[in-house]
């Protein structure tokens, strides 16, 4: 575990918690700047997974034997841990899912299927990740609902001056990202929730890029749904959750049928458990939930305010350094940004750049970042993205700059 | 610079990517194919005109993409001019084998295109190298008119990428 001395963190000691950071890539020390795609895992999470499989592994909620009790206890404790992390009023408001994508699909299918009618409007923004766009397109096709979008301005922020015309009484749900995964824009989510509620719309926050970086309090945010992924916050892949405000979540019908989610089953008809178990058909990702709880313990040990201060300072430093390069276009807002920077270089294509960087041990992401409509709007085929987490350092960003300068010399 | 990068981005390849040959629109093309690689947003427009004997008379491309896709398209158009359909198809198969490492890559038909052999060490870049060739494949199949093709659609050939 990292050491805390005189109220400030030793970030280099934190790095030692992550075994993979000692890995070499193509004979070079790894610089991992693809944290918006997935973060690395600390020893504490790896140990929790190992411990579960070595000591407690059994199915949950059904066996009457000791191991099943332990597994059930660990799984439900993990739910409580997630609830505390988000300051949810109750653990019953936390549905375990495979991650953000599945959480949003749950809402689109269960809530959308029951409540959405022809000509109802789902309001989204132009900066949504495909995971907060495609499920609504599918819902619109099934129901005849319409999609409407808050435009993104050239500086990467939402055109909120247009919100009064867009957020009308036909809007049944306003779903938006907290932090853009390609621009780094931090949206004013509390205000958006308040404005949506004023016209009677529900709200869904895509917290994929914020849950591991910022303190989140769902009661203060005032959202009806919030979706996030465990693997983007030190947890295992395939872990994540949907928060649903109890009064709303209880109105949703089941979406997947099977074991775990039923009260009684007859050949023709079944009755279902209450939320959240109603939405967790089949054997859940027990180890994933336990690993996610371990990740949350780890993150809270450092403290999200400290994490956000560190990450956003890295992103601001990277944005400033990148702007030094000739022919460089840095995307997203100038002042405040999340822990990532998207950029385009005049003479070097993102794919060539990421291949070149990878050969020096630097992991960047090149492409459309699951934001095709946004890329099209900005007239870009794709961008290169450097995304940070608390174990990254300014020295790594300086090394990135050397590699980018070498790439410019090589390709132009 | 490490050897894999040197092999992938040989000077000839970088030269073609900076100054692609046969770049532009072919005004009297018999067939035009729009190809795209949705995984990275790269696009190509390939125009082909066939001679009376059915061979490739004129071929040009435009669009945007990474160094590998641009060089592959540029070098492909240079090699294809004057080639019969059968030879063009044979080159397509040989090139696919070359960049995937899944076939006989010793075909003398490929000439300079052998310089793109380094792509096989970068499996995620095979689509970049194949973009122009998929457009060619569709052009040979369509013969006239307009068509679109994507690197995500099934490759009709001896192997897959």
Image (cartoon, coloured by chain):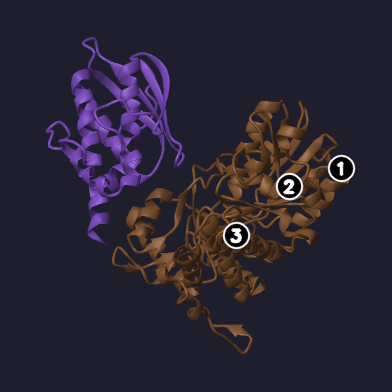
Chain colours: A brown, B purple
Secondary structure at badge 3 equals: helix
Earlier residue among tags 2 and 1: 1
User: In the image, which disc is placed on residue A72?
Assistant: 3
Secondary structure at badge 2 equals: loop
Earlier residue among tags 1 and 3: 3
Name the residue nearer the viewer: B74 or A85.
Answer: A85
Alpha carbons under labels 1 and 3: distance apart:
41 Å
One can see residue A127 in this view: no
- Chain letter of disc 1? A
Alpha carbons under labels 2 and 1: distance apart:
29 Å
Q: Is residue A324 above or below residue A327?
A: below
- The x and y percentages for residue B143 are 33, 14
In this rendering, position of residue A137 left or right of residue A354: right
Earlier residue among tags 2 and 3: 3
User: In the image, which disc is placed on residue A199?
Assistant: 1
In this rendering, position of residue B69 left or right of residue B81: right
Q: Which residue has dot 2 on it? A: A274
Q: Residue at x 59, y 43 (%)?
A: A259
As drawn, the residue found furthest toward the front would be A64
Alpha carbons under labels 2 and 3: distance apart:
17 Å
Name the residue nearer the viewer: A254 or A350.
Answer: A254
Q: Is residue A58 above or below residue A402?
A: above
Secondary structure at badge 1 equals: loop
Tell me if mark 2 has few (under 14), some (14-19) or many (20+) residues whose alpha carbon lies within 10 angstroms of its own: some
In this rendering, position of residue B40 left or right of residue A262: left
């Amino acid at each position: 575990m990292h050491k805390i001395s005189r109220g400030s963190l030793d970030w280099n000691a934190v790095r030692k918690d992550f075994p993979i950071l000692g890995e070499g890539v193509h004979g070079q020390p790894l610089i991992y700047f693809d944290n918006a795609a997935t973060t690395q895992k600390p020893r504490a999470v790896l140990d929790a997974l190992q411990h579960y499989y070595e000591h407690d592994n059994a199915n949950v909620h059904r066996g009457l034997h000791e191991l099943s009790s332990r597994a059930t206890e660990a799984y439900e404790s993990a739910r409580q841990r997630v609830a505390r992390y988000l300051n949810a009023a109750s653990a019953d408001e936390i549905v375990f899912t495979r991650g953000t994508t599945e959480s949003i699909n749950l809402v689109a299918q269960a809530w959308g299927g029951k409540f959405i009618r022809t000509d109802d409007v789902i309001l989204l923004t132009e900066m949504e990740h495909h995971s907060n766009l495609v499920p609504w397109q599918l819902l619109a096709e099934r129901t005849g609902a319409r999609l409407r979008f808050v435009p993104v301005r050239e500086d990467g922020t939402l055109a909120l001056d247009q919100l009064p015309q867009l957020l009308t009484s036909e809007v049944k749900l306003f779903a938006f990202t907290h932090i853009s995964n390609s621009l780094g824009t931090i949206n004013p989510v509390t205000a958006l929730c308040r404005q949506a509620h004023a016209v009677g719309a529900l709200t869904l926050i895509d917290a994929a890029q914020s849950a591991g970086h910022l303190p989140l309090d769902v009661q203060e945010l005032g959202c009806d749904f919030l979706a996030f992924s465990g693997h983007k916050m030190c947890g295992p892949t395939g872990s994540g959750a949907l928060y649903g405000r109890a009064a709303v979540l209880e109105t949703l019908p089941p979406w997947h049928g099977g074991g775990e989610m039923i009260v009684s089953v007859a050949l023709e008809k079944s009755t279902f458990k209450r939320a959240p178990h109603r939405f967790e058909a089949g054997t859940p990702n027990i180890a994933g939930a336990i690993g996610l709880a371990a990740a949350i313990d780890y993150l809270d040990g450092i403290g999200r305010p400290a994490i956000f201060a560190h990450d956003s300072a890295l992103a601001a430093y990277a944005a400033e350094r990148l702007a030094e390069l000739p022919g460089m276009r840095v995307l997203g807002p100038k002042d405040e940004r999340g822990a990532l920077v998207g950029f385009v270089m005049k003479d070097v294509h993102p794919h060539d750049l990421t291949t070149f960087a990878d050969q020096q041990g630097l992991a960047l992401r090149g492409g459309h970042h699951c934001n095709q409509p946004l890329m099209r709007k900005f007239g870009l085929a794709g961008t290169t993205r450097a995304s940070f987490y608390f174990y990254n350092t300014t020295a790594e960003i300086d090394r990135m700059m050397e590699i980018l300068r070498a790439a410019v010399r090589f390709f132009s | 610079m490490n050897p894999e990068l040197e092999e992938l981005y040989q000077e000839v390849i970088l030269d073609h990517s900076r100054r692609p040959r046969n770049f532009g629109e072919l005004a009297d093309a018999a067939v035009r194919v729009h190809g795209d690689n949705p995984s990275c947003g790269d696009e190509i427009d390939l125009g082909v005109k066939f001679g009376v004997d059915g061979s490739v008379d004129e071929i040009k491309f435009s669009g945007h993409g990474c160094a590998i896709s641009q060089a592959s398209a540029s070098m492909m158009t240079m090699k294809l001019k004057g080639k019969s359909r059968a030879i063009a198809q044979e080159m397509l198969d040989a090139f696919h084998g070359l960049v995937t490492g899944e076939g006989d890559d010793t075909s003398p038909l490929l000439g300079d295109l052998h310089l793109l052999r380094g792509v096989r060490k970068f499996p995620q870049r095979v689509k970049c190298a194949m973009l122009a060739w998929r457009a060619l494949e569709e052009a040979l199949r369509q013969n006239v008119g307009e068509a679109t093709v994507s690197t995500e659609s099934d490759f009709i050939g001896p192997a897959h990428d």
